[in-house]
Amino acid sequence: MIVVDVNLLLYAYDPDSPQHQGSRRWLEEVLSGSGLVRFPWLTLWAFLRISTNPRVFVRPLSPAEAHGAVMSWLEQPNAGIVEPGDRHLEILGALFRDGQAVGPLVMDAVL
């Protein structure tokens, strides 16, 4: 199973990003493949928030474009939403307390 991070999605939809071509190609390949692709709600919300922000992008997506992108991903037969399990907070707490997930790594641990 592939769990998608927001940075890859933003690169895939920002033609000005140096990572645009590779990210776009990767996203198209995984969504057209047979492996499971899962999107955390946190990732989808971040994509909607950041991709439409004119302070972040020279050419932000319109709300309709951003929503359409999300819907197009989720309409793929191998795609879906991943939800935190019952032990999510317990596992995250252990990673956090052990110092393995601090600062920017907290979001990676959440995913």
Image: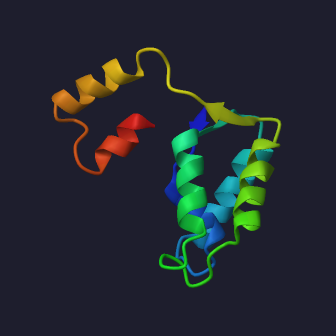
Whether residue 11 is visible to the viewer of this picture, yes or no, is no
Q: Which residue occupies the foreground of this view, 72 or 28?
A: 72
Quadrant housing the C terminus: top left
Which quadrant of the view contains residue 12?
bottom right
Quadrant housing the N terminus: top right
Whether residue 63 is visible to the viewer of this picture, yes or no, is yes
**Name of the residue lying farthest toward the bottom:** 58
Report the residue at 59% width, 37% height from top: 2
- Whether 56 is drawn above or below 97: the answer is below
Task: Please state if 79 lies on the left or on the right of 52 as rendered.
Answer: right
Report the residue at 63% width, 78% height from top: 15
Residue 73 at x, y percent in the picture: 75, 48
Report the residue at 61% width, 58% height from top: 48
Residue 106 at x, y percent in the picture: 31, 42
Total count of labels: 0
- Whether 59 is drawn above or below 52: the answer is below
Task: Please state if 47 lies on the left or on the right of 73 as rendered.
Answer: left
**Name of the residue lying farthest toward the top:** 86
Task: Please state if 45 lies on the left or on the right of 104 as rendered.
Answer: right
- Whether 50 is drawn above or below 78: the answer is below
Which quadrant of the view contains residue 101?
top left
Residue 65 at x, y percent in the picture: 75, 66
